[in-house]
């Protein structure tokens, strides 16, 4: 089985993995420089980096790399550590680079107005597979979004029913009105998407959160909503807003913890409950 073809298949199927590559060798080892091993998310492997205790440790590290989504370099001194001596090596040192293999980052943009048009361009450059949804064919079309993964011109709720966001998906809600924003947020918070963001002022955000909770949606569902959306960089124009949103998407994808002032209003209230002023 070809390791590279298997990586492509894993990503196409929306699965994770990690690739371990021998990047540096000194002395004698039971394999060769550039040898690779792919560890799938179910623990199965393709290829080998020499077997034995080294491979077992790298397998465990690969599982951890999948979870953290961050690469790691491992060094093994086969001369000094007797646990690596299984009668197969003469002794040597090797470095192994373990990198995560992640599914494509699917970005669903609800709304196809000015902000969405700019966000589509910036997010694509950052490596997101963009799907644009709007109920207006004059806005949701291939002329405006020629390289989008999908362009859907249909009622928002009907379109959402056709989508299956995964834990690696990102949802941005930038429709043209309060009603559609609320409809799509109601759907989005009940998906496994790793990121949900909605454009709008703090007052609008609070109003929508409260209305949806009155409908019976648990408050915990809003803990992960980024609203107002985007990093606070003072953005004003659609292009600037697109940059701020994409920056937030990247921070989420790279699992970068943001400062408290950039957290959503709802999360801040849970961490910093408002205190009534003393009379």
Image (cartoon, rainbow, N blue to C red):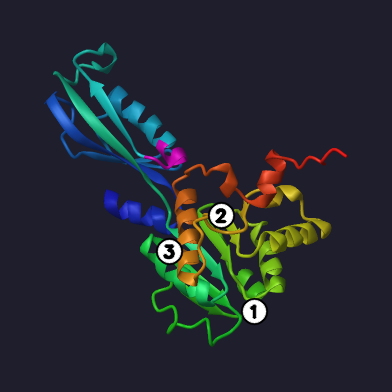
**Residue contact at pointers 2 and 1, CB within 8 angstroms:** no
Q: Give me the C-alpha separation between circle 3 and circle 1.
A: 24 Å
Q: Give me the C-alpha separation between circle 2 and circle 1.
A: 22 Å
User: What label does residue 255 carry, if any?
Assistant: none
On screen, 196 above or below 152?
A: above
Say what secondary structure mark 3 lies in. Answer: helix
Question: Tag 1: Cα neighbours inside 10 Å, few (<14), some, or many (≥20)?
Answer: few
Residue 34 part of the magenta segment? no
Say what secondary structure mark 2 lies in. Answer: strand
Relative side of 97 to 177, left or right = left
**Residue contact at pointers 3 and 1, CB within 8 angstroms:** no
Per the picture, the main secondary structure of the magenta-coloured stretch is helix
Res. 149 in view? no
**Residue at (64% x, 61% y) in the render:** 188
**Residue at (50% x, 60% y) in the render:** 245
User: Which numbered mark, 3 or 1, is in the foreground of this view?
Assistant: 3
Q: Position of residue 209 (x, y in %)?
A: 74, 58
Residue 67 part of the magenta segment? yes
From this viewpoint, which residue is outermost toward the bottom? 138
Counting residues from the start of the chain, the first of labels 3 and 1 encountered is 3
- Relative to the observer, which residue lies in front, 37 or 213? 213
Relative side of 12 to 264, left or right = left
Res. 36 in view? yes
Q: Which residue is mark 2?
A: 195
User: What label does residue 155 carry, if any?
Assistant: 1
Q: Which residues are magenta?
A: 65-70
User: What label does residue 123 carry, if any?
Assistant: 3
């Amino acid at each position: 089985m070809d390791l590279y073809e298997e990586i492509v298949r894993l990503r196409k199927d929306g699965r994770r993995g990690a690739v371990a590559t021998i990047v540096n060798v000194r002395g004698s080892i039971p394999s060769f420089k550039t040898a690779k091993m792919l560890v799938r998310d179910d623990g199965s492997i393709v290829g080998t980096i020499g077997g034995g205790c080294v491979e077992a440790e790298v397998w465990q590290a690969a599982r951890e790399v999948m979870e953290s989504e961050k690469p790691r370099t491992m060094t093994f001194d086969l001369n000094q550590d007797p646990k690596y001596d299984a009668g197969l090596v003469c002794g040597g040192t090797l470095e192994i680079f373990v990198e995560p293999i992640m599914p494509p980052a699917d970005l669903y943009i609800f709304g196809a107005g000015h902000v969405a048009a700019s966000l589509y361009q910036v997010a694509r450059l950052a490596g997101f597979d963009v799907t644009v949804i709007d109920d207006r064919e004059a806005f949701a079309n291939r002329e405006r979004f020629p390289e989008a993964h999908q362009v859907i011109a249909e009622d928002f709720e009907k379109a959402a029913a056709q989508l299956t966001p995964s834990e690696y998906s990102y949802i941005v809600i930038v429709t043209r009105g309060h009603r559609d924003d609320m409809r799509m947020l109601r759907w989005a918070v009940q998906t496994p998407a790793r990121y949900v963001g909605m454009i709008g002022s703090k007052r609008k955000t609070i109003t929508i959160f409260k209305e949806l909770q009155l409908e019976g949606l648990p408050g915990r569902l809003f803990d992960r909503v980024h609203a107002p959306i985007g990093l606070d960089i003072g953005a004003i124009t659609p292009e600037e807003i697109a940059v701020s949103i994409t920056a937030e998407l990247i921070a989420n994808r790279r699992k970068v913890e943001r400062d408290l002032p950039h957290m959503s209003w709802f999360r801040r209230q849970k961490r910093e409950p408002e205190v009534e002023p003393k009379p």
